[in-house]
Amino acid sequence: MKKLMVFSSLILAFGVLAGCNSEKTEGEGNSKSVELLNVSYDPTRELYQEFNDAFVKHWKEESGQDVTIQQSHGGSGKQGRAVIDGLEADVVTLALAYDIDAIYEASNLLAEDWQKRLPENSTPYTSTIVFLVKKDNPKGIKDWNDLIKKDVSVITPNPKTSGGARWNYLAAWAYAEKSFNNDETKVKDFMKKLYQNVEVLDSGARGATTTFVEREIGDVLIAWENEAYLTLEEFGDDKYEIVNPSISILAEPPVAVVDKVVEKKGTKEVAEAYLEYLYTDAGQEIAAKNFYRPRDEKVLAKYKDQFANIDMVTVDEKFGGWKKAQETHFNDGGTFDEIYQPQ
Amino acid sequence: MLANHNSVAAETNKPVILTRNATKEPKSIQWILISIVLLFLTLFLVVPLIAIFVKAFEKGADAYFAAIAHPDSMSAIKLTLIVVLITLPLNAIFGVVAAWTITKYEFKGKNFLITLIDLPFSVSPVIAGLIFVLLFGLHGALGPLLQNYDIKVIFSIPGIVIASIFITFPFIARELIPLMQSQGTSEEEASLTLGAGGFKTFWYVTLPNIKWGLLYGVILCNARTIGEFGAVSVVSGHIRGMTNTMPLHIEILYNEYQFSAAFAVASLMSIFAIITLVIKIFIEWKTDFKSSKVS
């Protein structure tokens, strides 16, 4: 029983401590130091690690204020869901516009026109979808149609939860539409065959990458370009190589300030500066170094050897925007449900 | 765990009878059975455990300690300990109260109550986590109310504690109920008739009788609280250095290609588990000792 007493006094102590802590953080709003929470998608971990350090320095010089930036990463859809359920993100940096639209629709935490508030559709960097294969490409994978061969095993995450997976899906769809002259039955047949070859359907892009490189399952990983290059950097280009398909999609991962949260926490100014810093030369440079395609022409020119020239469609032109693409392909009863039959 | 314990006891009883009936049972069968058990344990327990430590020390002891001393790891360890320190005493109190209610009183619906206590064992941890998101989330039943008073439950420490309590509350009650049932109420009745008050009776009669069972339950509860992944993952929000417990932090490190660091933290959890095991063995030995003395 003595133990119990000790335990309960400890709880009390912790309670008091926690109380003090929360008071402290709440009081910090506009004075000495400030905290931001960036809720992001899976493969941006390394990007924001570097970017946050740079921004902390920049903000200190600019305003004299200390800022701490907290990160949370996961599948893009899942992360959006968490923000809707009350995860207090000052900024969201997700894989695709629909996941931020969903936050607006379900919770009104930000304005409907959020995507117009920053340049380039609020997308400071872009990427595309490529293939990662084993060194010397033993299965001879060159383009999308090689992925439906019987002996090829494909790794891609689940489009229901992962943003990257939805870009993968749309890129494959764009290829099929082009090769079958928009014949929908043939396109769906192609997609069906492709997803029959999928061996593991992870919930997020990073999970799919570790399945491919750590657990060594599958012949080809359909991946974000940035994620594929990062894998080469982490695991060595003597083990893997990148294959650029004949056609892919311009992936635009957008960023937004969550209005209601920054109003409540008093972090509007620093949150806006944080996102704007992504568009500066310094921010663009960090994006390029982490294999995201910078929007800025000068920075892009500097890193142009790094990014292959791939024929890319956009979701707005080809699929009528994310809202429509989401409804047609990924909502319940969409084409993904139609074509995907687990083995 | 309890069921496991029983079945082991049942298995060890059998051979005793067999050898008495057929003493000429070939030794070879004994050896084969023993080696099968050993092989199984080696394959599924010892090898993975060694693998964790090998991988953790892959980049040397310096890297190992640096990984554990990293602020994010330290914060995960600290958070896990805070959760344990809140969960254990609350569950201990609940466990004793529940066991007392069930074993010392007669009332209708008792079996239903026992089933209810077992519920967290049968509910998937993910569902358990989602229940609390539905309750305390921004659009949950209590969300607007909490929002009004600016109280954060989900995606912060209270949510993690609540989910952990939910997952682990049956452990102590489940441990105490059979024990108190077998002890009956006669000793308490004697104490009461001799003039001791209710609290005095509990303190000097009941508690000494159940203390090893209680401690055993606390240890199981402790192990599960430290290791809980599913429910905590749903309510955590995965904020680095703030709402990641040790299991969640291990997953994050693993996903960031920091394999050695992931296994370093994992090895620390394994050490916790081994310590728990040693205490468990000690308690079992104590209780066995006591019960054999009684009989």
Image (cartoon, helix red, strand yellow):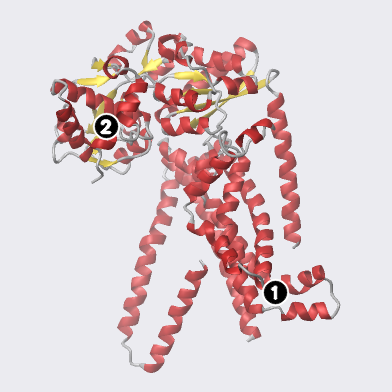
Q: Is disc 1 in the same subunit as disc 2?
A: no
- Name the residue beneath numbered marker 1: B209
User: In which quarter of the view is residue B74 placed?
Assistant: top right
- Kind of element beneath mark 2: helix
Which residue is drawn at the image coordinates 53% and 56% (left, top)?
Answer: B120
User: Looking at the picture, how far across and down is residue A287, in whole percent?
Assistant: 41, 18
Rendered position, A272 above or below B169? above
Q: Residues within 10 Å of mark 2 (few under 14, many from 20)?
A: some
User: Looking at the picture, how far across and down is residue B108, in whole percent?
Assistant: 63, 69
User: Looking at the picture, how far across and down is residue A127, in whole percent?
Assistant: 33, 20
User: In which quarter of the view is residue A86 placed?
Assistant: top right
Rendered position, A261 above or below B227? above
Residue positioned most to the right: B195
Which residue is drawn at the image coordinates 80% and 70% (left, top)?
Answer: B198
- Name the residue beneath numbered marker 2: A335
Q: Chain of mark 1?
A: B
Q: Are marks 1 and 2 in contact (CB under 8 Å)?
A: no
User: In which quarter of the view is residue B32 placed?
Assistant: bottom left
The amino acid at mark 1 is Asn
Of B256 and B55, nearer the camera is: B256
Which residue is drawn at the image coordinates 60% and 14% (left, top)?
Answer: A269
User: Looking at the picture, how far across and down is residue B127, in whole percent?
Assistant: 48, 48
Of B19 and B132, nearer the camera is: B132
Residue positioned most to the top: A298
Please give left or right for residue B128 compared with residue A43 in the image.
right
- Kind of element beneath mark 1: helix
The amino acid at mark 2 is Thr
Rendered position, B193 above or below B235? below
Residue B169 in view here: yes
